[in-house]
Amino acid sequence: MPMIDFLLFIRMLFFAIIALCLHELAHILAANYMGARPEKMKFFLLGFSARFSGLEKLQGWERYVIYAAGSAANAIVFMWAFVVSRLSYFGLPWLEEFAFINLALCLFNFLPVLPMDGGRILHQILSNGLGILRAGKIMRKISTVVICMLFVLGFLQVILFLFNITLLCAALYIRQSNKHLPTILQIEFHKIMDAKRKPAKLRLLPVRYVIVPKDVTIQFLLERITMDNFTIFVTQNGEKIKESEIVRIVEKNGLALKCKLV
């Protein structure tokens, strides 16, 4: 019996590695096609992940395609493996196991927390709706909730399923990845702002007008700059202020600037 359990573990581990390779390969192929480039491969307890450079130069829908490509690949493999295993005359239980691994990886990557694919998609949606900096604050709160839930479920999994620590490992990985999240999001903010100043990028961005109240602060305006729009702020007396002017002020004084706009 122990030998059977060990062989099952080895087989599931092998399937997990293949599923992870397919997942990251889909991200890489999508990124290369859209114009981004793999920057770094990061290995961790549950597998590995790829980081890309140049994402801030792409259009919004192109980033969505890249973020969703990995989970889409796992979903396609799951459907193929499950259907083939069911239609097979002899039955292929190992193919059902492979299908289950791909489904689990697909669902896990759609968790609404950074750096998972679902978290990146949610972060971009929030960034375009509420502003990049405000979206970052919300993502940090969501991350805290998800990590706590994974730890609770992970301890239950250890008790109920013979010391299975998969969810605990997932919680630790996400917690470690979010350790420097505020700094990472600030760096990404500046990358996006630099990319938006390029004439080629500006021509593709829709203009978004935001009416602001009297005696508004620089910080208030800064937090309403979105990812895939060029924002123009309109004051009560009709004056128009471009987001690039706000960013130049902040670059000289820092992100924590609280003074009122004169």
Image (cartoon, rainbow, N blue to C red):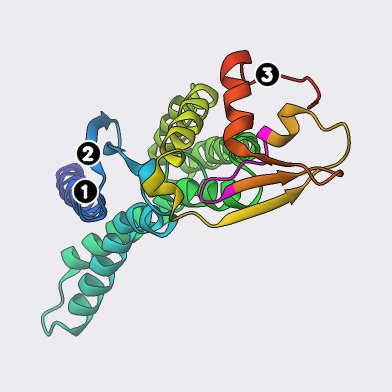
Residue 28 got which mark?
1
Q: Residue furthest top?
A: 253
Q: What is the CA distance from the residue labelled 3 to the residue labelled 1? A: 36 Å
Give the mark toward the camera: 3 or 1: 3
The verdict on residue 227 being magenta is: yes
Q: Give residue 260's position: percent from left, percent from top.
A: 81, 24
Please give the name of the residue rendered at 63% of the width and 43% of the height, measured from the top-left corner.
131
Q: Amino acid at mark 3?
A: Ala
Q: Check disc 1 and report its element: helix, strand or loop.
A: helix
Residue 113 point in image, percent of width and height: 51, 42
- Specify the segment rendered in magenta: 222-230
Locate residue 58 relative to residue 133 in the image: left or right: left
Depth check: give the residue in front, 46 or 116: 116
Is 208 left, or right, of 18 in this rendering? right
Alpha carbon separation for disc pair 1 and 2: 7 Å
User: What main secondary structure does the magenta stretch of the protein show?
Assistant: loop
Residue 193 placement (x, y as % from top left): 49, 35
For residue 32, above or below residue 242: below
Mark 1 touching mark 2, by CB under 8 A?
Answer: yes
Q: Residue at x 78, y 27 (%)?
A: 261
The label on residue 256 is: 3
* Kind of element beneath mark 2: strand
The amino acid type found where label 2 is placed reads Pro
Q: CA distance from mark 3 to mark 2?
A: 32 Å
Identify the amino acid type marked 1: Ile
Image: 77 above or below 248 = below
Tell me the residue that label 2 is attached to. Answer: 38
